Amino acid sequence: MRTKSLKKNKINVVTLGCSKNVYDSEVLMGQLRASNKEVVHEEEGNIVVINTCGFINNAKEESINTILEYVQKKEEGVVDKVFVTGCLSERYKPDLQKEIPNVDEYFGTTELPGLLKALGADYKHELIGERITTTPKNYAYFKIAEGCDRPCSFCAIPIMRGKHRSTPMEELVVEAEKLAAKGVKELILIAQDLTYYGLDLYKKRNLAELLQKLAKVEGIEWIRLHYAFPTGFPMDVLEVMRNEPKICNYIDIPLQHISDSILKSMRRGTTKAKTTKLLEDFRAAVPEMAIRTTLIVGYPGETEEDFQTLKEWVKEMRFERLGCFTYSHEENTHAYNLEDDVPEDVKMDRANQIMEIQSQISWELNQQKIGKEFRVVIDRKEGGYFVGRTEFDSPDVDNEVLINAEDEYLRTGEFFNVKITAAEDFDLYAEVVG
């Protein structure tokens, strides 16, 4: 018979999924520390909290495997308690309780006070912006809203995250000031939909005003936009981007597809012509802008003709950054009523074709950077290189700038001017200038 550990409780928070989950874990950890709990991130602890993802099949599998791994450790006496929170738990709590009963308790995405109580902590309402960041010290994910009101047919996020809820500007400015005081220099704005920001609180799309307020925070040098929705995009944001040096000339705008019939079935509220015009307007307003997008292939009813339309459009648009996913058939979504009729191998082949095109585009665009100078921030040292990014690159998903560590000593979190000396598909090599 196993005995309970007598050591002081240490809570290990394990984060799976997207940057929104990273943010939520950081808030949880900040609350725990405010209650004088010992908390670590993805290290050893006798109490484990798993923040799960429930978005698509691969992510769900990873979350379930992680839960099973820690339940096994609990049975072996390596850990004492296992708690599960996040999107998978929100979406499938009854099934999980039945299938994996040895988890101590399951919590949904809005049940932070209950989770804290189970961990012996109090929820402190006054902790605006008090979180323990887990990213490199120079950047932090900055969630400006929760939930989504969009009706996209393939997406389960509204089921897991609820309706759109903007965070008031005053709170966001306080949070940005606290992050800046800790040495954060780059805010990466995230939400399920940035472009909806403010509609619920201020009865208008208010992202541009928020950006102006955040740009006034001393110590913040870069502000980056992730996850903008194309329909109803507030064009005054482009004016702020053009005129305010702190706003990176960068936008992540998931477009998902371009065939009109697929866009209609996806319930995206736009067309090929409107989307193409929007991107042309972006580039006219901010010529230097790097546009990142994500696409879905293999959606129900996607014909070879639809796919060829998408392929040709990707070649034509020459996105600076692009990711491609295969369609995942998710229950309780509108598209779940459609037949998942594109075979898995065809989905994979189509995704590979898109990424091959993008790889070539990325290589060509990177060749044009050789000999040019850029301002980069150094995120880390890896192997024989200091690894940095330009304002046109977001962490983990975009190009990296590699600077030989034998030639220079560079402090992480600092900005340097560099000259690009060589370039590959997704890596740039540089030397410090000036």
Image (cartoon, rainbow, N blue to C red):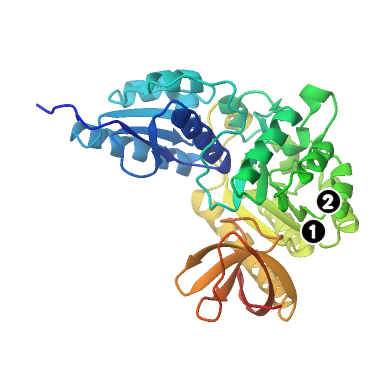
For residue 422, what is the image quadrant? bottom right
Answer whether labels 2 and 1 touch (C-beta < 8 Å): yes
Q: Nearer the viewer, residue 223 or 9?
A: 9
Nearer mark to the viewer, of 2 and 1: 2
Q: Is residue 152 visible?
A: no
Q: Nearer the viewer, residue 272 or 287?
A: 287
Disc number placed over residue 188 in the picture, else none: none
Q: Earlier in the sequence, mark 2 or mark 1?
A: 2
The percent position of residue 69, horizontal first and vertical second, equals 29, 39
Which residue sits at x=45%, y=34%? 51
For residue 66, what is the image quadrant? top left
The percent position of residue 60, horizontal first and vertical second, equals 45, 38
**Picture quarter with the C terminus:** bottom right
Which residue sits at x=74%, y=64%? 315
Which residue sits at x=62%, y=62%? 414
Disc number placed over residue 241 in the picture, else none: 2
Q: Is residue 345 above or below residue 116?
A: below
Q: The residue under label 2 is which amino acid type?
A: Met
The percent position of residue 405, horizontal first and vertical second, equals 51, 76
Q: Is residue 216 above or below residue 104?
A: below
Q: The residue under label 1 is which amino acid type?
A: Met
**Picture quarter with the N terminus:** top left
Q: Nearer the viewer, residue 104 or 169?
A: 169
Q: Is residue 203 visible?
A: yes
Report which residue position mark 1 lands on: 289
Instruction: Report the side of 380 relative to 141 (left or right).
Output: left
Q: Is residue 117 above or below residue 268?
A: above
From mark 2 to mark 1, how far is it between C-alphas? Answer: 9 Å
